[in-house]
Amino acid sequence: MTGCDSTVGPFSPGQAKACTVREVLDRVGGKWSIGILVAASRGPVRFTELERCVEGISRRMLTLTLRNLERDGLLRRTVYPTVPPKVEYTATPIALELYESLVALTEWADRHRVAIAAARAAYDREHGRVANAIESV
């Protein structure tokens, strides 16, 4: 086992801090988390709204990601006692603090996606690789 696996024994203070930071960055920078957090930072959002606005996410992955973001204190889940039950997700204050950075990151990615795709294609040509659809932007 390596890295942040708690089964390998106690961590030094520096290791514990590095593990926490890496875990937080992994969660926040996860494939689906950014879109969910940006949507929830604009105001309360329902599951079906997230399903529509986070392109390509499955219901199962949306559920798992929402649970993890709630567990990390980035989302608040509110269930209203109606029939059928109404559930909303809102960004917590720490997620709202992160919002500007997430928007800047997504805008940067959108501005540079064509250049990055071209750089990948050039790299693959130079190194004799066949472009992988998963790697494309």
Image (spheres, grey):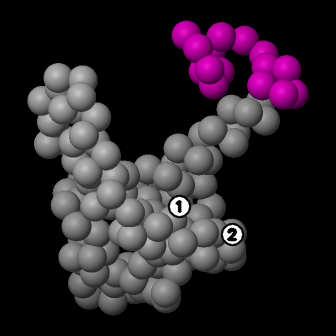
Q: Quadrant of residue 7?
A: top right
- Residue drawn at 26 percent across, 87 percent down: 83
Mark 2 surroundings: few (<14), some (14-19) or many (≥20) residues within 10 A: few
Q: Nearer the viewer, residue 13 or 132?
A: 132
In the image, what residue type sits under mark 1? Glu
* Badge 2 element: helix
- Residue drawn at 16 percent across, 36 percent down: 132
Is residue 35 magenta-colored? Answer: no
In the image, what residue type sits under mark 2? Ile
Above-or-below relation of 40 to 21: below
Specify whether 116 is left or right of 66.
Answer: left
User: Where does residue 45 sit, x and y in percent of width and height?
Assistant: 39, 83
* Badge 1 element: helix
Number of the label disc, if any, that sits on residue 70: 1
Mark 1 surroundings: few (<14), some (14-19) or many (≥20) residues within 10 A: some
Report, in whole angstroms, how far the alpha carbon at label 2 lies from the one at label 1: 12 Å
Specify whether 51 is left or right of 68.
Answer: left
The quadrant of the image that shows the N terminus is top right
Q: Which residues are magenta?
A: 1-15
Is residue 13 magenta-colored? Answer: yes
Specify whether 67 is left or right of 99.
Answer: left
Q: Which residue is mark 2?
A: 94
User: Where does residue 25 sit, x and y in percent of width and height?
Assistant: 59, 47
